[in-house]
Image (cartoon, rainbow, N blue to C red):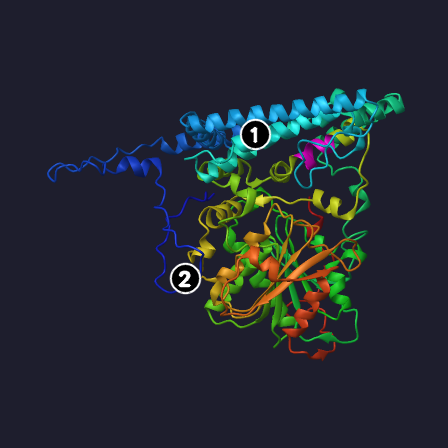
Amino acid sequence: MRDPQPQPQPQRPTARRPKSSADVAAPPPAQTPAQALAQPPTAVAPPPSLPAAALPPDSNQGLRDLVDRAVHALMARTTLGLSPASLGLALTDWAMHLAASPGTQASLAALALHKQGQWLRYAAESSARILGGNPAPCPACAEPSPGDRRFAAPQWQQLPFSLMAQRFLLREQWVDAATHGVRGVSPHHEQVVAFMARQWMDMLSPGNFFWTNPEVLERTAATGGMNLLQGLRNWQDDVQRLLDKRPPAGSEQFRPGHEVAVTPGKVVLRNRLMELIQYSPATPTVHAEPVLIIPAWIMKYYILDLSPHNSLVKFLVDQGHTVFMVSWKNPTADDRDLGMDDYLHQGPLAALDAVGSIVPQRKIHAVGYCLGGTLLAIAAAALAGRGDERLASVSLFAAQTDFTEAGELTLFTDESQISFLEDLMWSQGYLDTTQMAGTFQMLRSSDLIWSRMMRDYLMGERLPMNDLMAWNADATRMPYRMHSEYLRNLYLRNALAEGHYKVDGRSVAVENVAVPWFVVGTESDHVAPWKSVFKIHLLAESEVTFVLTSGGHNAGIVSEPGHPRRHYRWATHPGGRPYVDPDHWVQLAQAEDGSWWPRWHQWLLAKGSGEQLPPPPCGSVAYPPLAPAPGDYVLQR
C-alpha cells in the first residue's frame, strides 16, 4: 500500500507564470526528522578530513513509524480529526505574544470595563422602564452579527432574558477583540484561535440551556412539558439512526431515482471511479454543443438534479441542451491508493472522450461544481498545454483555482493538521462522511449544531425535511491518497495558481486556457468564499464572466427561476484588460433580480455555434447504454 509523502517543492518555471497580486518566494521544502538528522549543522561545518557520520541503519524505523501513525489515528478519532498540536501551537503563539504586550492587555482591560459599563447602563434603563410602566424594550447596547438570529424572538426582549442576551453579545465582542490584532501572532494562528474561541462562545450561548432560554420555558409551560418529552424522543431517534448508520429522519422521502434525480437518461460509461449519464432530449432539436457537468466527488451529483422544479439538469434539457453528468463512485478502503491523477484521467478526461464519441466533431461546454470545478480547471489547463481544443467554454460554480484566501477551511490545512488527518485516513483508507460533516458543521456551529439541538431536543420540533437537506445527508467518502494530495497540493502549496501543479509530469497553468470562462460565486459561501473564487481573474488570460449570486455554497447554485428573494450581480471582463479588485467589481457589476440560470443559458448559446441539430443517439458503438439513470454509483452508501 502506498502512503502519500510530502513532495519537494518544484522550482518555479522560467516561463511566464500566472498573474498574482504579489510575488511571494516559495518556502523551502519541509524535511523529515530523518533527513534533518542526516545533515550536519549549517552553522558549524565539520572539517574536510572528518566527514559527518551517517546515521546507522535502523531496521525498526518502519515499525516505529507504524506505531506513531496508529497513535495519531486513535487520537484523531477522539478529536474529530483536529490536531491537538496545531491548536496548541496557535494558542501558545497568541498567549505568549499577548503576555508580552502590556499595552494590548491594557486596551483589552479598558474595553472590558467599557462593555461592563454599557451593560450596567442597559440594565438600569431597562429596570427604570419596567418600574415606570413602560413595556417597550430598551434600545440594545450590542447587536448580533449579520445572520445571527439566536436572540431574534420577542421573548428575548423581556427581562431578565434581555440582560442575558446583551451580556453574552458584549462578551462575544470582547472575545473577538482579544483574539484579533495581537502584534506578532501569525495570521494563521490568529484565525485558529479566533475560530476556537468562537466555538466556545457558541456553546455557552444562553439560548442553549433550558433555564436561560425564554422560548423553551414558554413552550414548556404551554405544553405541560410535552415539548421535552418529544425532544427526548427526537434525541433517541437520532442516536439510534447514528448507531445504525441511517440517514436523518425524513430523508427516506427523497430517494434518488424516485423523488429526486428523476430526469430521464442512460448511463453510457462506467469505470472504477465514475458513471457518465447522458440525459434524454426534451426538444425536437438541440444545440450543437453538448454540456458536460463535473460535480464534486465529496457530494452526490444529484444536487444538480433534485426535484423536477429545481433541477439544473432538467432546466438545461428543457432549453434544448444535450447534457452529460459525471456520477462519482462512493469509495471504500479498497480505493485508498487512488490519487488526483486517477480522478483526473478517469473523471473529466474519460468523460470528454465519451462525449466526443457520442457527439463527434463538436466542441463541449464543460461545467464544474466545487471540487469538480477545481478538477475541471486542472483538466482544461492540461488540455490547453498539449493543444487539445475540444472545449468550447469552461463554467465553474463555487470552485476555487487559487487557495491563498480559501476561507475558514484553511484553518484545518497546516502541516500539523494535514499530517494528523493523513494518519486518520491511513488507518481506515478514507475520510469518513461523519468526519467531514463535523468539520463543515463547525464552520457554522451556532446554526448547524447548537440552534438545531435547542430546536430538536428542547423545543421538541423538527424542521421539515426537503430535497436539499436530504441530499446534504447523503454524503460520500474521500480516498486516503487523493484527499492527501488534494490538501497538500492545492490548500497547502497552492500549486495550481503557482504553476507547480503537474499532470503527466508537466506543469499546467490556467492562463493557457484560451476559451471563455463563466464563474459563479455565492455571497455567503463558507466553503469557497466568493472573493477566493474571484481570483480566477488573476489567472485566466481569456474572457471571464463572473456572477455573484445570493445564497450559500449549495443554495446559491440551486437557484431555479421563480425562487423567491433571489438576486445576483454579473460583469464580463475581456481578456487583456486591467484587473478590477472584488470590492470595486461589486460597485461596477450589473445587479439583477431572480435566478442566474437564464443568464448562463444565454451565455452558453453565445459561446456556441448557434446551430440546431436533431438530438444525438443515446450512447455510441464504443459507449453503449448500460443502465437507466440515475445509475448504480449514486445509490452506494
Residue drawn at 39 percent across, 64 percent down: 16
84 relative to 470, above or below: above
Say few, some or many: other residues with alpha carbon within 10 Å of mark 1 (under 14 / 14 to 19 / 20 or more). Answer: some
Does residue 529 belong to the magenta stretch? Answer: no
Q: Which stretch did the figure color magenta? A: 446-453
Q: Amino acid at mark 2?
A: Arg
235 relative to 40, above or below: above
Say few, some or many: other residues with alpha carbon within 10 Å of mark 2 (under 14 / 14 to 19 / 20 or more). Answer: some
Residue drawn at 53 percent across, 38 percent down: 425
Mark number displayed over residue 423: none
From the image, give the main secondary structure of the stretch colored magenta: helix
- Estimate the x, y position of residue 423 in percent, counting from the top left: 49, 36
Answer whether residue 270 is visible to the viewer in this image: yes
Q: Amino acid at mark 1?
A: Val
Q: Secondary structure at mark 1?
A: helix
Report which residue position mark 1 lands on. Answer: 175
549 relative to 426, above or below: below
- Estimate the x, y position of residue 283 in percent, counting from the top left: 79, 72
Answer whether residue 519 is visible to the viewer in this image: no
Q: Is residue 297 left or right of residue 65?
A: right
Measure the C-alpha gap from mark 1 to mark 2. 42 Å
Mark number displayed over residue 17: 2
Counting residues from the start of the chain, the first of labels 1 and 2 encountered is 2
- Estimate the x, y position of residue 297 in percent, counting from the top left: 61, 51
